[in-house]
Image (cartoon, rainbow, N blue to C red):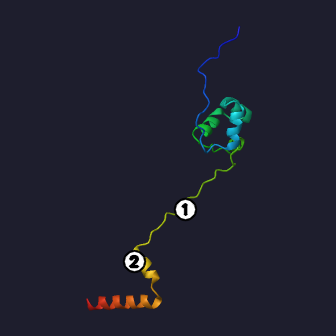
Amino acid sequence: MTSKPRGRKKRPLENIHPNAPKRLVSRYKKLGCNQLNLAKELGVNDFYVNRLLKDGIEPSNPEIRVRLFLPRKIVKHKTGAPKYDRPAWLYWWYRLSKDERHDVMKSHVEAKRND
């Protein structure tokens, strides 16, 4: 007489997070989409495998990261500085020649003196 499996049957993940390494995903599919068998094969807790495949959350422990086919150190992607849009008058100012800028400043100073 065989015993029935206990508990509910776990379904394979339908949506694997894009942050999961491709090597981990291919190993997951080779093992029949079984996270527990994958965790045992890699020698890590199934908690880390589940979080990485499902949510894309990477562990911070370097040894565990290496076992999950991630780089040892966490890679921080740099975002560029926010784009600064100059005011329109500044574009106009930079297009002027040096002599024209001098004339504008001279007229501005004379206008201030007359006020």
Q: What's the residue type where badge 1 is placed?
A: Gly
In percent of width and height, residue 47 lies at 62, 34
Where 111 falls versus 94 (above or below)?
A: below
Q: Nearer the viewer, residue 14 or 77?
A: 14
Q: Residue at x 45, y 91 (%)?
A: 99
Q: What's the residue type where badge 2 is placed?
A: Trp
**Earlier residue among tags 2 and 1:** 1
Q: Residue at x 34, y 90 (%)?
A: 107
In percent of width and height, residue 56 lies at 59, 42
Where 50 falls versus 104 (above or below)?
A: above
- Left or right? Give the position of 99 relative to 79: left
In percent of width and height, residue 89 lies at 39, 77
- Left or right? Give the position of 99 relative to 108: right
Give the position of the C terminus as an image quadrant.
bottom left
The residue to which callout 2 is attached is 89
The quarter of the picture where residue 49 lies is top right
Where 5 falls versus 115 (above or below)?
A: above
Q: Residue at x 62, y 30 (%)?
A: 12
Q: Residues within 10 Å of mark 1 (few under 14, many from 20)?
A: few
Q: Secondary structure at mark 1?
A: loop
The quarter of the picture where residue 19 lies is top right
Give the position of the N terminus as an image quadrant.
top right
Query: Tags 2 and 1 in contact by the CB under 8 Å rule?
Result: no
Where 88 falls versus 107 (above or below)?
A: above
The residue to which callout 1 is attached is 80
Q: Nearer the viewer, mark 2 or mark 1?
A: 2
Q: Secondary structure at mark 2?
A: helix
Q: Residue at x 42, y 80 (%)?
A: 92
In percent of width and height, residue 91 lies at 44, 77
Q: Residue furthest top?
A: 1
Give the Cα separation between the discs numbered 2 and 1: 26 Å
